[in-house]
Image (cartoon, rainbow, N blue to C red):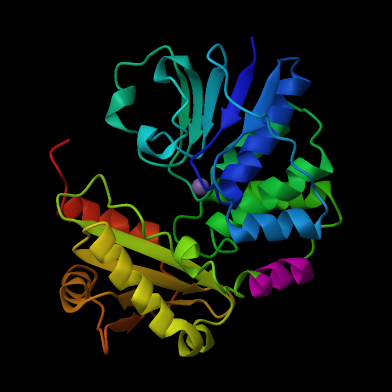
């Protein structure tokens, strides 16, 4: 029996790192395992793979008899269509547990609402005393760094910090200089702006029609000088195509430690201003410290919970 470790379509650094490293962990425990993903990985993951010359070797497809391990997600709407939910045997994630899991005691579930799911797999290597490869150490490290904005966002847990430090000790190739280079490279967004913005899906936990995207860049003010109009065009297009009423994007400045929320329309600026207490000017609001989308969405979900 083969296990396939997979994540949401168009995975980011966290998803890619878990897929790769957890497959390695399973194999080192003598299980038959492969990883697989669909769509295009986020630019940042590509940058890290290239910088450290790490090659992925994915399974070509999911077979009917494969058992599935989901990492960095537990949402059935986000995963490859070929997955039969009966075949899911394990989940490692850091997002809120979805209701379909309530009566699935057969699935081994580890969900902890911490900064990065990569932390959970790093912890398994460490606790089970299994030697980690340079590739998995590097990928998991950048999974944590990317999800926690270099350990700066509020959701960062003590465990995220400990595991990032532990991973860094596993290979001398990880340096702060390379991390800065990766952040800067990642900010060079050209034609992939719409993909990078992550505004395609309405929030399934809210009663209002809401989508908030996120961009993580090295210098937000400079970035907005250049791309604000393009960002607004994407917000407008997506809101029309997907029929989203409240649409915005949270632009996080990874180097200087602040965020600018760009609202797609007046009513979005108003609702964020009323709930989070930010002042918008020209449909833009700047925060004093780094605020992540997750933190904002958490507040919004509490106020605009849907029935299910
Ligand atoms: Mn994640």
Give left or right: position of 254 versus 232.
Answer: right
x, y percent for residue 57: 75, 36
- Residue 26 found in image quarter: top right
Toward which corner of the image does residue 5 lie, by quadrant? Answer: top right
**Residue 294: x %, y % from top left:** 38, 56
Magenta includes 76? Answer: no
179 inside magenta stretch: yes
User: Residue at coordinates 57% horizontally, 16% vertically from top-left?
Assistant: 66
What segment is highlighted magenta in the picture? 176-185
Is any atom of residue 161 visible in this view? no
- Nearer to me, 290 or 79: 79
* Side of 229 relative to 51 (left or right): left
Q: Relative to residue 28, is residue 116 depicted above or below? A: below
Residue 89: horizontal and vertical position, in percent?
A: 50, 17
Q: Nearer the viewer, residue 198 or 286?
A: 198
Does residue 264 show up? yes
Horizontal side, residue 32 vs residue 281: left or right: right
The residue lying furthest to the right in this view is 172
- Residue at 71% across / 15% down in the picture? 31
The residue shown at (36%, 16%) is: 104
* Left or right for 155, reference 173: left
Q: Is residue 144 above or below residue 248?
A: above
Main secondary structure type of the part rendered in magenta: helix
The relative height of residue 176 versus residue 138 in the rendered view (above or below) is below
């Amino acid at each position: 029996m083969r296990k396939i470790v997979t994540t949401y379509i168009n995975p980011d650094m966290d998803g890619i790192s878990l897929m790769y490293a957890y497959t390695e962990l399973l194999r080192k425990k003598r299980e038959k395992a492969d990883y697989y993903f669909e769509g295009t990985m986020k630019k940042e993951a590509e940058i890290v793979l290239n910088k450290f010359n790490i090659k992925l070797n994915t399974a070509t497809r999911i077979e009917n008899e494969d058992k599935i391990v989901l990492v960095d997600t537990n949402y059935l709407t986000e995963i490859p269509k070929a997955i039969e939910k009966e075949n899911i045997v394990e989940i490692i994630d850091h997002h809120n547990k979805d209701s379909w899991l309530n009566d699935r005691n057969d699935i081994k579930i580890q969900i902890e609402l911490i900064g990065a799911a990569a932390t959970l797999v790093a912890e398994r290597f460490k606790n089970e005393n299994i030697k980690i490869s340079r590739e998995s150490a590097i990928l998991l490290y950048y999974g944590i760094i990317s999800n926690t904005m270099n350990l700066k966002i509020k959701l960062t847990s003590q465990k995220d910090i400990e595991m990032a430090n532990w991973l860094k000790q596993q290979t001398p190739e990880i340096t702060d200089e390379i991390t800065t280079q990766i952040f800067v490279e990642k900010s060079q967004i050209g034609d992939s702006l719409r993909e990078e913005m992550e505004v395609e899906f309405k929030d399934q936990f809210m009663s209002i029609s809401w989508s908030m995207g996120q961009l993580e860049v090295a210098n937000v003010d400079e970035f907005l000088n250049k791309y604000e109009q393009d960002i607004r065009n994407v917000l407008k297009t997506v809101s029309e195509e997907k029929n989203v009423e409240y649409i915005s994007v949270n632009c996080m400045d990874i180097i200087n430690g602040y965020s600018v929320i760009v609202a797609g329309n007046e009513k979005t600026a108003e609702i964020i201003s009323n709930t989070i207490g930010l002042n918008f000017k020209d449909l833009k609001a700047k925060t004093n410290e780094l605020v992540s989308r997750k933190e904002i969405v958490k507040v919004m979900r509490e106020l605009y919970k849907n029935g299910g």
